[in-house]
Image (tube, rainbow, N blue to C red):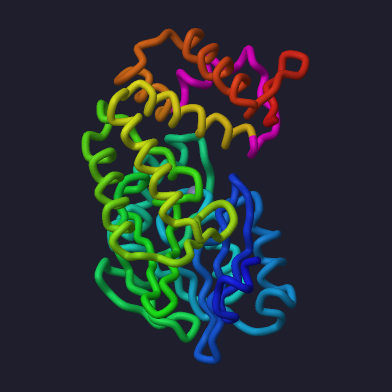
Amino acid sequence: MTSELLPPQIHVFVRDWLSSNNILLKSPDGHVLIDTGYVRHAPLTLALLRSQRGLGDEPLAKIVNTHCHSDHIGGNATLQSAYACPIALPEGEAPLVERWDTKALWLDYADQRTDRFAVDEIIGARTTHRWGDLEWQAIAAPGHDMGALVFFNPQHRILISGDALWENGFGLILPRAVDPAAMPATRATLDVIATLDARAVIPGHGEVFVDVAGALARAYARIAAFEADDSRVARHALKVLLTFRLLDQQRMLLADLPAYVERVGFFRDVNAACLHLSPEDLAHLLVRELIRAGAVKMDGGHLLPA
Ligand SMILES: [Zn+2]
């Protein structure tokens, strides 16, 4: 399906929720890869890139990231050492990576990991780039990540949206009580995306989609629900993070969860600002809602991804 929607020099490796999609933009002038997945999957990302569907024996000229969360930058170090290519980051993200701010990058702060890498180039908003023989406009897309960029090709009206817009929603955002800027920025970014009149969206997670109006309508409905209830934003963010942790480590002892939500800063801070629950009550709430949503299941005292 992807190949019919996109020019042939764009290849999308659709991954999962632990690893972001990898978007390969091929050109005789040098191949560019946007986003590199999660660190645990880095060997698979390299293998996909080296496959005949990817680059085969050809070199990679550049790595670009839409934003610097662990599921998008986790292959950077592995791919950079394999291909000796530069890494280009959004201007709002580069300083965080340069000083390796593991709180702002949601690494140890959110109990996530990545291999450290160096910044080689900075991409400003409102700049234009030629990748894969196509022109891409870098557009600021704050919200899920305040330094994120999306990339738009006006000729084919293709949007590389990262986690700013998915077919069904967008990446988790911080509740107003923790970051007052995140929710208004998320809505403003949807407004900007709506003006682009994109024909196809290559999201950070999930398949390429063309019902952009439908995706925007669902995203607007979600942000409206979030704006009406900050505790819903908080619960959503913590459920997403807990599911991510389970996808990474596969199982967690339920009895360990209260100590976990007290130890990991993201859970502790969001709970303290919004939910005001004991660690035991927070653990029970998250598990109950995730089981009801069919996202996790229990197995002999262990929590597993469903
Ligand atoms: Zn992501």
Overall secondary structure of the magenta stretch?
helix
User: Which one is in front, 184 or 168?
Assistant: 168
Is residue 210 found left or right of 184 in the rendered image?
right
Residue 189 is situated, as x and y percent measured from the top left of the image, at 29, 52
In the picture as drawn, the residue positioned furthest to the right comes out as 300
**Residue at screen point 54% across, 11% down:** 284
**Residue at screen point 30% across, 20% down:** 273
Residue 80 is situated, as x and y percent measured from the top left of the image, at 55, 69
Asked whether residue 84 appears in the rendered view, the answer is no
**Residue at screen point 49% across, 76% down:** 62
Residue 119 is situated, as x and y percent measured from the top left of the image, at 39, 66
- Rendering quarter of residue 141: bottom left
Residue 70 colored in magenta in the image: no
Please state, as top left, top right, bottom left or bottom right, where the C terminus lies in the image: top right
- Rendering quarter of residue 184: top left
Is residue 296 found left or right of 183 in the rendered image?
right
Is residue 113 found left or right of 227 in the rendered image?
right
Count of numbered circles in the view: 0
Asked whether residue 185 appears in the rendered view, the answer is yes
Residue 163 is situated, as x and y percent measured from the top left of the image, at 44, 51
**Residue at screen point 53% across, 15% down:** 283
Please state, as top left, top right, bottom left or bottom right, where the N terminus lies in the image: bottom right
> Is residue 84 depicted above or below 209 in this figure?
below
**What range of the chain is rendered magenta?**
247-264
User: Which one is in front, 10 or 71?
Assistant: 10
